[in-house]
Image: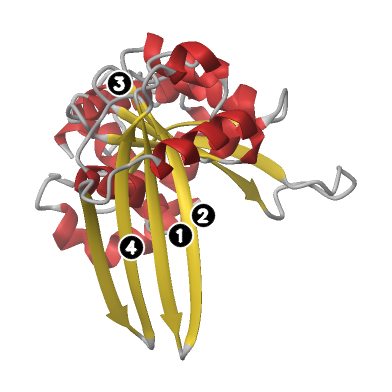
Amino acid sequence: MDIFLSAFDDIPDPRADNARHDLCELLVVGLVAVLCGATSCAEMADFGRPKKHLFRDFLKLKHSIPSHDTFSTVFRMIDPKALDAAFGRVLAQIAVLLGDGDVIAIDGKALRGARDKGQSARARMMVSAYAARLRLTLATVATDSGGELEAALEVLGLIALKGKVVTADALHFNHRTVAAITEGGGDYCLALKANQDSLLSDARSCFGKALTDHPVARQQEAGHGRNETRTGTVVSAKRLAEHHEFPDLKAFGRIEARRETDGKLQTETRIFALSWILEPGVFMAIARAH
């Protein structure tokens, strides 16, 4: 919470000098309330009052929890650009907590019911970069001005990729996205499907040539009437990076899943393009983190 307090401390207080509630503390209470589901100033106040003793573990709250009128006044007057800059500083400090090898998942989601009446019925799409270990969204871009691919490239440009592993579904395995990741100093683990049919065919050929004693990793899970076994394999991509013009393509990963649910058997095979050769167990953990 000290990260937020230090970032909010630089926001100009739009109120008179005799304001009763500390601006930083008010913003922290409002932030925590919103993270817990509050959608209005009244709900911020209602959330804070019964939790006053918890907030006092890290806030002074000389005049207790602000009223809904106080929240409303502050949020009407505060400089939105200064508030946005403060959150930018928070994200910059949190990004420092990311370590080498941390997984950043790129994913697009449709926002149902996000259009006003009379607007296009098409669902609005948002593309996010999600830090799997921290369980934190680092950046989000709407697709209003372009498609999901363009939004993903914009998201990648907003975060530091050096030493990180970027994961994404097959839509994002293309020359521009791969170049953006590698030029930023990151590695990639990207799903490979029929949108890259020639490369997918070559990848299957690489697995077909693997020796019978090739290293594999296995994971088993059971529960709620389901038994699942996943087998992970990593093989070298040899010189296919130059042939297909994909920077730093070094290996392919494959996960074969065998799932039995209430007596019904399902199988699934997924193939990934990798920018480095890694142990099968590590590869499976990265794919699972996405």
| 20 left or right, relative to 189 | left
Tell which tag, 2 or 3, sits nearer the viewer: 3
Colour setting:
secondary structure
- Pointers 3 and 4 in contact (C-beta within 8 Å): no
Marks 1 and 2 sit apart, C-alpha to C-alpha, by 6 Å
Q: Of marks 3 and 4, which one's residue comes earlier in the chain?
A: 3
Q: Which residue is mark 1?
A: 43
Q: Which residue is mark 2?
A: 39
Marks 2 and 4 sit apart, C-alpha to C-alpha, by 42 Å
- Pointers 1 and 2 in contact (C-beta within 8 Å): yes
Residue 168 in view here: no
- Pointers 1 and 4 in contact (C-beta within 8 Å): no
Marks 1 and 4 sit apart, C-alpha to C-alpha, by 45 Å
Closer-to-camera residue (23/104): 104
Give above or below for 55 relative to 286: below
Task: Determine which of the numbered discs, if any, sits on residue 230 in the image.
Answer: 4
Residue 245: image location, x then y, percent: 52, 12
Q: Which residue is mark 3?
A: 89
Q: Of marks 1 and 3, which one's residue comes earlier in the chain?
A: 1
Amino acid under label 3?
Arg
Marks 1 and 3 sit apart, C-alpha to C-alpha, by 26 Å
**SS for tag 4?**
strand
- Pointers 2 and 4 in contact (C-beta within 8 Å): no
Tell which tag, 3 or 4, sits nearer the viewer: 4
Amino acid under label 1?
Glu
Q: Residue at x 31, y 33 (%)?
A: 19
Mark 3: few/some/many CA within 10 Å (<14, 14-19, 20+): some
Q: Of marks 1 and 4, which one's residue comes earlier in the chain?
A: 1
Q: Quadrant of the N terminus?
A: top left
| 35 left or right, relative to 152 | left
Amino acid under label 4?
Arg
Q: Residue at x 52, y 20 (%)?
A: 177
